[in-house]
Image (cartoon, grey):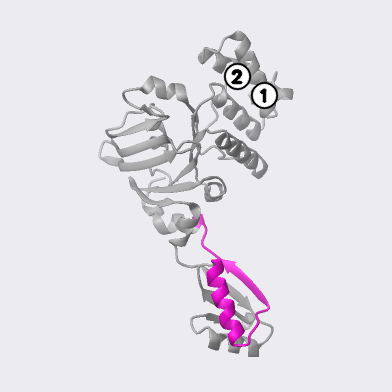
Amino acid sequence: MTDSGITVSGLRKSYRDKIVLDGIDLDVPAGAIFALLGPNGAGKTTMVHILATLVPADGGTATVAGHDITAQAAAVRAAIGVTGQFSAVDNLLTAEENLLLMADLHHLGRRTGRRVAAELLERFDLTDAARRTPATYSGGMKRRLDLAMTLVGAPRVIFLDEPTTGLDPRSRRAVWQTVRELAAGGVTIFLTTQYLDEADELAGRVAVLDHGHIVAEGTPAELKRRVPGAHVRLGFAGAEALAAARSALPAATPDEENLALRVPGDGTVADLRHLLDRLETAGVEPETLSVHTPDLDDVFFALTHVAEVAA
């Protein structure tokens, strides 16, 4: 899809003398998974609240699912789903009752509401627990119910604000799979997360928010290439081979104790081919080779001033 799911231009928000968002521009295509990263207090949740029409912006414009968040707020609300950092399920109602309540709020009608609830209970593997209250659920089950409730109205855009906080690895991966399936079905996903591996795993594009500004945006691979430190580590069978490789690769850093060289490089196929060609010309064959590239953790710490942001 090429239509915009979310467009943001010059968005601003302040609380008294604290500037939270200072002229934010974003364009998220429909059906894409977009991740917004940033330190605690950087404004990620504020951004979600503004786009979901829960908090007014001080300036700028934004559209969600083709609707202006100010002039067409009701249409925006009808087109979106929001899952916050903390579960919104009612612990006094059963899972089925929670879903039926959402169906009533969406004016689905009794028969349609029951059908949708049953489908979602099955989709999220909650059928056996449908008549139990969420107070008896694990954290992962509660989060699955929370997501199911978000989907009752068949939203075109879903805001997931740190959706896997506190979940165990198995539950996190179950949520990831659901997010992928939603995007594959054409739903636009706007994700905020503190887990850098989560953004790397899910998002086609990532933006880093810090001190009210987008300080970087691109695919995970593009952002990683902006951070220095990529290298190839070569291991050799003996000191003689190591010495020959050092002569062929003068920019490399030796690790004589482990008979290894650290060679700066971007880890691309072309870069590796060039490296191996130089070794072959020198008559040296490495015993081991491994490529090390920066991850999104490195990007996060390189581009944000974490220590200066209030938790």
Q: Residue furthest right?
A: 128
Image coords of residue 158 (percent x, y): 50, 32
Q: Quadrant of residue 261?
A: bottom right
How far across and how far down the image is residue 253, in percent? 52, 80
Magenta stretch holds residue 285: yes
The amino acid sitting under disc 1 is: Leu
Instruction: From the image, tell me which residue sits under label 1.
Output: 121
Q: Which mark is residue 99?
A: 2
Q: Is residue 186 left or right of residue 126?
A: left
Which of the 4 image quarters holds residue 129?
Answer: top right
- Whether the magenta-drawn stretch holds residue 99 is answered as no
Kind of element beneath mark 1:
helix
* Magenta segment: 268-297
The quarter of the picture where residue 238 lies is bottom right
Q: Is residue 207 above or below residue 62?
A: below
User: Residue 170: x and y, percent?
Assistant: 67, 42
Q: Is residue 51 left or right of residue 273?
A: left
- Residue plotted at (60% across, 15% down): 100
Residue 284 lies, with reference to residue 208, above or below; the image says below
Q: Amino acid at mark 2?
A: Leu
- Number of residue marks: 2
